[in-house]
Image (spheres, grey):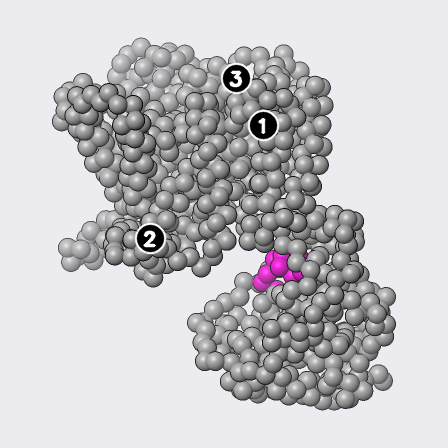
Amino acid sequence: MKYFASILFRFILFAIFTYLILLLIWGYMLPNALKPNLNYMVGGNGFTNSRLKELKQNPDVDVFAFGSSHTYRGFDPRIFKKHEISLFNMGSSMQTPIQIKTLIKRYITKIAHKKVILEVYPYPFCLDGIESAVDLIANDRNDKHSLSMALDINNIKTYNTLIFGYLNDQFSGKSDFIENPIFENDTYVNGGFVEKKLSYISCTSFNEMSWNYKETQFEVFEEILALLKAQNVEIILVYAPIPKVLYNAVNNQEIFHERMETYGPYYNFNEILQLTDTLHFFDANHLNQIGVELFNEKLIEVLNGDGLLKNK
Amino acid sequence: MFFNSLDFAIFLPIVFVLYWLIPKKKINSQNLFIVAVSYIFYSWWNWRFLLLILISTIVDYIIGLALTKQSIPGKRKTLLITSLVVNLGLLGFFKYFNFFVDSFTSAFSFFGKELSANSLNIILPVGISFYTFQTLSYTLDIYRNKLKPTNNFIAFAAFVSFFPQLVAGPIERATNFLPQFFTKRTFNYVQATNGLKQMLWGLFKKVVIADNCAEIVDYTFYHTDNLQGSILAVGAILFTIQLYADFSGYSDIAIGTARLFGFNLKQNFAFPLFSKSIAEFWRRWHISLSTWLRDYLYIPLGGNRGGSWQTMKNISLVFIFGSLWHGANWTFIVWGLINVAYFVTNIAFKNTYNTIKISSNLINTLINYGSILLTFCLTSLAFIVFRSENLNHAFNYFNQMFSSSLFSLPEFNQTSKIANTTLMVLLLLCIEWNGKNNLYAIEKFGFDWNRLLRWCFYSFIIFLIGMYMQTTFSPFIYFQF
């Protein structure tokens, strides 16, 4: 038995070592399509890399916005600046409360005593958070918060990407990577915003559907609120506009609204602002620049009206 | 608790260490420990259904003892029938009640009579089909004087509930398995490492092969009406591989786990995908069930001793019973009947084939490979019915598959998914082909290599599991049976 235990222990060490070596080989040498459980893409869709680099150089803003692509495509710092409010957009693709918690913990010194807009699109509350986690791992430094995020998600793809990320940070690093600010029809705008070349949604429809909310994401969300409150951060919850065809197709949003209302000041701009799908959106999810301007102006007006945005 | 879960990854090492800490002379303590951890293992799913296992255990324990004390044939028969009624009654209620109620009401409405009957919301207790057959084998063997009953209740309870094979087999025979609970179990290094190797290979088959195939298979079966015939054919082939990898993967993990505790379970799959005939396929597929049916149904019915018609009748009964064992659905029954047709054709052709003598090695080799391919295709066609939601769905699948688009190049949306799955399936087939003469594929893989190379191979399998496993959890298919 002792011999078995000793051999097994040695084999486990050997297997871990081999796993790391093979992970590096797979990570560096194989195309993405052939490594389904390793998704380490520096740069790429969503400009997370540019956004987080800018954040590190940009010390002081009034308002931080967190959330999914609805955030980085929906909250334009240039419009806020016209109203003498500096806003930094911390959104990333498919960002769920798990990633928001990671970012807040990591950048808590910058966020403390500021205002935070949490863009609360219900769909990320239905996700496990893998896609957004691997985006964050590949495009930001990896620390203990990354490990905590991976443990929260508990998925082999996140673990593989994180291990590769740690190894890659050691061996090659990513600080020298410079992301092109223009990718296809997207342009990165300082302050974390991504502007899409003006286009309009083509006719689309959705069947009636329900979203399967994950209770764990709500639990993490409650942790975020507690964390921010402890740092004396003012929190505003905003549901940014989505096309009516999508909004009306989901038949179980009421419970989401009710829940959000218990967390703090909650603004559902799908009810506050009446937009037209074919004029103000470029796809089935996102506002085009005309829609962004209307939404942001209204948002600032409403929040200012309630005394939430400008410093008292 | 599933073998492919984190819970089991924590449960197993703890149980393993505690088990071997019990002094080996105290066999009864080891057995008691097995009963306790097996019940915990089962309770992870639903503790209420432990009662059914307990009923089955107590009834067969008492009847087993009573059978030896009883010499009057009529009374012995009554005892046996009691055991059959209790065990098959529980199985029948939980598994077939709704099926019969629904079938009767449908039959009446077909003839224009409306019959009101409520089916119940019955949960199928996991593993009931497996442990019921296992305990029945005990009573049947005592009845046929092939086995002496045990008066050690703990050992018997451990035999019924042994956690590695409790929920999906292999269905063990009391003659092979029960005596192992009375022999001194000492830790054996070779047996334990063999167990770990088999578990590793089983896990690879389940989480890499079966679960990746499942995603494509589910897609083809959910969107049957809108897909090309060639894609549906790929779906059917992959379902056969999925089913094999899923169930044989489970069996490998079960057998491997049992080895860690000093027990030897029977081989349940002997590389059935390489069978050259339907008869051979059924000798290699789910062996513990097919031999159970052979010994307790086919042979008592007369086997092949009553001429051709009698043999056909017995084969048909065995297949129908075996197909119903899988579940209460007409798809299973039709699947069984298709296999009867295959079997009968197989027997007829076998006689013709045996009279032909071919001296060319090349032609013989080609015939062998051709037979493997043909058998695989035939079983894949039959499994379409097995996998379908109902007979209408199966008919639709065949109809769509055998359309003109069967010969078009399949156009998949997720090419990378298909590419990765194909690569992994090819790797599986190569390794299984290489090890097809062993108990499991990697049993002697790299046997003559030095330790470092062998460890590299096992580590590579672990890496493939980490890199290609399906990230969404899916339970074993045979849990539903």
The mark nearer the N terminus, 2 or 1, is 1
Query: What's the chain of the residue with tag 1?
Result: B
- Magenta span has A132? yes
Q: Nearer the viewer, mark 1 or mark 3?
A: 1
Using the image, name the chain to which the residue with label 3 belongs.
B
The crowd level at tag 1 (other Cα within 10 Å; few <14, some 14-19, many 20+) is many
Instruction: Identify the mark at residue B181; answer none if there is no mark.
Output: 3
Tell me if A87 is positioned left or right of B440 in this view. right
First in residue order: circle 1 vs circle 3: 3
Specify whether B313 is left or right of B76: left
Q: Are marks 3 and 2 in contact (CB under 8 Å)?
A: no
Find residue B230 and name its label. Answer: 2
Q: Please state which of the two labelled residues, at mark 3 or mark 2, is closer to the viewer.
A: 2
Dots 3 and 2 on the same chain = yes
Task: Give the vertical position of B288 relative to A151 (above or below).
Answer: above
- Magenta part of the chain: A125-135
SS for dot 2: helix
Instruction: Please tell me which residue lies in front, B337 or B48.
Output: B337
Question: Is residue B46 something that shows in the picture?
Answer: no
| Residue A269 badge | none
Residue at x 77%, y 64% (from the top left corner): A104
Q: Is residue B83 above or below residue B392?
A: above
Identify which amino acid the numbered label 1 is placed on.
Leu
x and y percent of residue A46 in the render?
Answer: 65, 68
